[in-house]
Image (tube, rainbow, N blue to C red):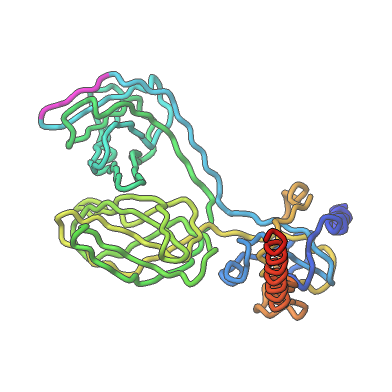
Amino acid sequence: MTKLLLSSLACCSLLLADFSPPAWRYRRPLTVTLPGPVSEFTVDSGLYHDSAANLDDLRILRNNTETPFVIVTLAGARQTMEPPATIVNKAFVPGSGVQATLDLKGHAEHNRLRISTPLHNFKENVRVETSDDSRTWALVQSAGLIFDVSRDDHNVSENTVIYPLSTRRYVRLTIPGWTDPANLESVWLSSYKETGATRDIIATQNPTVREDSKAQTTELLLDLGFAGQPFDHIELTVDPGLFSRTVEIAGSNDQQHWYSAAGGVIFRTTEDQQLSLDTAERTERYLKIIVFNADSAPLHFGAITLSGIRRVVKFASSEPGSYFVYVGNPNARQPSYDFARVLPSNGLPGGAKLGFVEANPLFRLPERPWTDRNPWLLNGALVVAVIAMGFITLRMMKKVT
């Protein structure tokens, strides 16, 4: 039954398909190593490189017939819950800083707190403690960091502090650098869980380093070689020493126009260190990491590693035959198949192996417009039109005279 359904979908998909072999520049052989109703392969760096439309131009053919598929992002499961919590006191405590206590009125799970503040351009440590009776406190985070960097026309901030999962009723946070309770407008608690994500390292490079003594920054530049390969996690290597620096991330495809992506704080203390940065998924070719040194000496950086969430392609493979994966059409639209909605949820997928990239033997460059291929005709027509207009104008002037 499954084989019949998938075969029917493969035929029906042709009615809406936009595949025309001469429009696709590249192809790669695809060998099904373990036959089954569904097989899969991992999207590798080569496919990202050769794709001209962020994988919207990916097509799979079997015996010159389009095969339905779906691209699955292995992001795992993410769950966020925000139990109600009430601030029962908020005050400035001499010798400690601004302090606030939250009551969950129960024992719900929590491992993050998020604050709201009217301040800009700051970096502060946050101390977090938990308790069951609001008298005996256990320290769960001694070096949480919140920050805000506002300059020019953009803003980067992080007002969330993470700590180990807890079910204690009371949470107390202390910000030593603040003296005014009004700086702490609101506080929310939440429980965040992420499981099952599969990641791949896409690049490990030593950055090009540029020091700007006037701006008191260190710029780390990476060239990934091409645009289109997604990443969302950055790991830095820093020489030994204790530090705490605010960091801003920007991306570009031409090194002329830079787009702010995210920000964070990297630090190393006697107790802990944080040398990784997370951002929304990026696909630019160039990545710039700006480290704000203030009056501290610049840090010395080593290799930087970028990683992204893995994507796999699941496709109908119940019929024997040779397969090819096609990419390289900048005008292709994202295909739409029923296959994604009827994909079997049980059973292990079959294996498939991608071969090396090769030029599509049927590829043809798009034909240039007629006017581009015959520019002399257009120029000649303009000359004739100018002469004709001049002749008509002279005749009219003679008549008027």
Q: Position of residue 344 (x, y in %)?
A: 76, 50
Q: Where is residue 297 in the image (x, y as percent from the top left)?
A: 16, 61
User: Picture quarter containing residue 53?
Assistant: bottom right
Residue 124 in view (yes/no):
yes
Q: Where is residue 179 in the image (x, y as percent from the top left)?
A: 16, 30
Compare residues 180 and 349 and report the one nearer the observer.
180
**Number of numbered discs overlaid on the protein picture:** 0
Residue 389: say if magenta.
no
Q: Which residue is drawn at 35% across and 34% down?
A: 113
Compare residues 34 and 10 and report the one nearer the observer.
10
The quarter of the picture where the C terminus appears is bottom right
Horizontally, is 57 left or right of 249 in the view? right
Residue 24 in view (yes/no):
no
Horizontally, is 361 left or right of 164 in the view? right
Horizontally, is 182 left or right of 156 in the view? left
Q: Residue at x 71, y 69 (%)?
A: 391
Q: In this view, does 147 lie above or below 281?
A: above
Span shown in magenta: 89-94
Q: Which residue is drawn at 73% across and 76% down?
A: 377
Q: Which residue is drawn at 44% across and 26% down?
A: 83
User: Picture quarter containing residue 286?
Assistant: bottom left
Residue at the farthest front position: 401
Q: Position of residue 257 (x, y in %)?
A: 42, 60
Majority secondary structure in the magenta region: strand
Compare residues 356 and 254 and report the one nearer the observer.
254
